[in-house]
Image: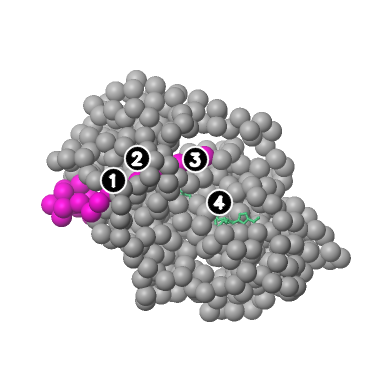
């Protein structure tokens, strides 16, 4: 496949987003903006993982499907993420999910979420998607004895649900993380791994196109209005009359996306990628190439890409001049935690917005008969969207919403959403204080 590999190039401007994934992306499929009027059985709004997975699923069932994407395929969170495939929740765990939803509904959601990693790798394999998909497993080291006990219980619960999850010892954790001291063991989910997210999105788009889906990039949807028994979807270049509409716009709030994005808390996240590391360093810090995200409130995460670049992320307490500051702080933290021989060259810094639901669970939203949205991937969206797309496709083909495994939430805007940045900053400060109190670690010296 033709590859659009650009050189990392000149040093980055202070606030310029440069996504590693755009610089190492495969050739993009050709699509056109919507011009004039059209029809569809199902109209999908948003060309990220959720919309593309739903569209592919629906086309495979023989429906006439169109995708309208405001920018370009993978231009939202699907192209901004770190590519960790993590088949569980960021905050909720099996026990709290069952407590929140009840035994039957809780277990159905857990079965869905737990299968998300396998589904990503299956989608990549079945559609021959060239996206560096590696199902190496995902590691979650515990930074305190209490959290180690909690993760051991969580691993046992996932195991009882049939998932390939185990709890590994402190010594084994140290081996898998390049000798990082202080971890009390780790949860290992063997169905997790890594992908190149933009190439995964582009591959989903190619598969959807091959199944007859019409994709229109550069086509923002301004409004969706009831039209008889269906819906009229309006864009600057034309309109689409559709029987059903799926809103897959995640954290975005432009035009009709506000209906969904306004129901979630927007979470700005910075990502960085270094220059490729020497092979001996790679072999030490990640002998099995497992991505890891630990349990600290201010998460420590890392993975390698196909060229052995180190990828990590973080969140800024203060939004001012955060781009350059965060880049420097994240790479310094990597060097300190992983005891790298020197601070690696910082080649890419970019920012994206994740969508958090207030209960940290995924949800469906009904905006009218047959007009459905879904979100709630809470920073662990790659595995989740592979399942959410299928659930939305079920919703669009007549399954009663109450019978679906993802719970329905009221389709209303969050009150006080404009103060989300303050709440996020407060939560980050609290997390740092808690980590400092645990004091198991000697590093984490970043000043962000
Ligand atoms: C920085 C960052 C790091 C992350 N890291 C990870 C990770 O490592 N692992 C993981 O599992 N998850 C991660 N996530 C979460 C994951 O990326 C998301 O959950 C997932 O990509 C959501 O996919 P989506 O298709 O629902 O949304 P998106 O990819 O955001 O797609 C929504 C699309 O809708 C389009 N759109 C918006 N408004 C309109 C409109 N009016 N008309 C038409 N189109 C519109 C947008 O242009 C966009 O392309 C991360 C998120 C961020 C931001």
Where residue 42 sits: x, y (%)?
69, 69
Give the magenta-colored segment's residue range. 267-288
Circle on res. 50:
none
Earlier residue among tags 1 and 2 = 2
Asked if ligand 1 lies within 8 A of label 3, the reply is: yes
The alpha-carbon separation of the residues under discs 3 and 4 comes to 27 Å
Label 2 element class? helix
In the rendered image of this protein, does residue 61 appear above or below residue 189?
below
Task: Answer above or below: position of 239 versus 299.
Answer: below
- Which residue is label 4 attached to? 109
Q: Does the magenta stretch include residue 21?
A: no
Image quarter hosting the C terminus = top left
Q: Nearer the viewer, mark 3 or mark 4?
A: 3
Q: Which residue does the numbered mark 3 point to in the structure image?
A: 268
Outermost residue on the right side: it is 228
Q: Distance between the residues labelled 3 and 1?
A: 20 Å
Q: Do the residues labelled 1 and 2 touch (CB within 8 Å)?
A: yes
Please say which color scheme the image uses: one colour
Q: Residue 346 carries which label?
A: 1
Residue at the (66%, 70%) spot, across then down: 34
Q: Is residue 218 found left or right of 9 in the rendered image?
A: right
Badge 3 marks a residue whose secondary structure is strand
Tell me if label 3 and label 4 are in contact, CB under 8 Å: no
- Residue drawn at the location 37% of the way across and 38% of the way down: 324
What is the distance, in whole Å, between disc 1 and disc 2 at their CAs?
7 Å
The disc, 3 or 4, on the residue closer to the chain's N-terminal end is: 4
Circle 4: element type: helix
Counting residues from the start of the chain, the first of labels 4 and 1 encountered is 4
Does the rendering let one see residue 127?
A: yes
Label disc, if present, on residue 327 of the rendered structure: 2
Choose between 269 and 350: the one closer to the eye: 350
Sequence-earlier tag: 2 or 4: 4
């Amino acid at each position: 496949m033709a590859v659009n590999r650009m050189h990392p190039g000149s040093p980055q401007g202070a606030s310029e987003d440069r996504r590693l994934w755009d610089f190492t992306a495969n050739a993009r499929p050709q699509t056109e903006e919507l011009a004039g009027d059209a029809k569809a059985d199902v109209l999908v709004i948003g060309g990220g993982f959720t919309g593309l997975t739903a569209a592919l699923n629906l086309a495979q069932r023989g429906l006439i499907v169109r995708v309208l994407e405001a920018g370009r395929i993978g231009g939202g969170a699907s192209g901004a993420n770190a590519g960790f495939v993590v088949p569980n929740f960021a905050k909720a765990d099996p026990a709290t999910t069952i407590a929140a939803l009840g035994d039957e509904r809780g277990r159905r959601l857990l079965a869905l979420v737990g299968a998300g990693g396998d589904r990503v790798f299956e989608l990549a394999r079945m559609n021959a998607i060239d996206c560096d998909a590696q199902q190496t497993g995902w590691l979650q080291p515990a930074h305190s004895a209490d959290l180690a006990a909690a993760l051991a219980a969580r691993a046992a619960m996932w195991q009882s649900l049939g998932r390939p999850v185990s709890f590994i010892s402190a010594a084994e954790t140290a081996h898998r993380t390049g000798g990082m001291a202080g971890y009390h063991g780790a949860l290992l989910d063997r169905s997790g791994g890594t992908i190149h997210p933009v190439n995964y999105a582009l591959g989903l788009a190619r598969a959807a196109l091959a199944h007859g889906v019409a994709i229109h990039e550069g086509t923002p949807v301004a409004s969706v209005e009831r039209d008889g028994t269906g819906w009229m979807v309006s864009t600057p270049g034309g309109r689409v009359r559709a029987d059903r509409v799926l809103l897959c716009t995640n954290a975005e709030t432009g035009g009709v996306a506000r209906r969904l994005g306004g129901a979630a808390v927007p979470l700005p996240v910075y990502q960085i990628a270094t220059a490729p590391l020497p092979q001996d360093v790679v072999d030490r810090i990640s002998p099995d190439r497992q991505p890891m995200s630990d349990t600290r409130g201010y998460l420590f995460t890392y993975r390698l890409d196909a060229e052995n670049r180190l990828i990590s992320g973080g969140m800024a307490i203060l939004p001012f001049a955060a781009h350059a500051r965060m880049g420097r702080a994240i790479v310094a933290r990597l060097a300190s935690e992983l005891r790298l021989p020197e601070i690696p060259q910082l080649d890419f810094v970019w920012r994206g917005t994740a969508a958090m639901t207030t209960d940290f669970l995924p949800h469906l939203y009904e905006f009218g008969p047959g007009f459905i949205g879904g979100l709630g991937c809470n920073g662990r969206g790659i595995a989740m969207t592979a399942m959410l797309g299928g659930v939305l496709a079920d919703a669009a083909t007549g399954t009663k919403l109450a019978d679906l495994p993802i719970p329905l939430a009221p389709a209303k805007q969050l009150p006080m959403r404009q103060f989300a940045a303050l709440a996020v900053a407060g939560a980050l400060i609290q997390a740092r204080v808690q980590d400092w109190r645990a004091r198991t670690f000697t590093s984490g010296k970043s000043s962000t």
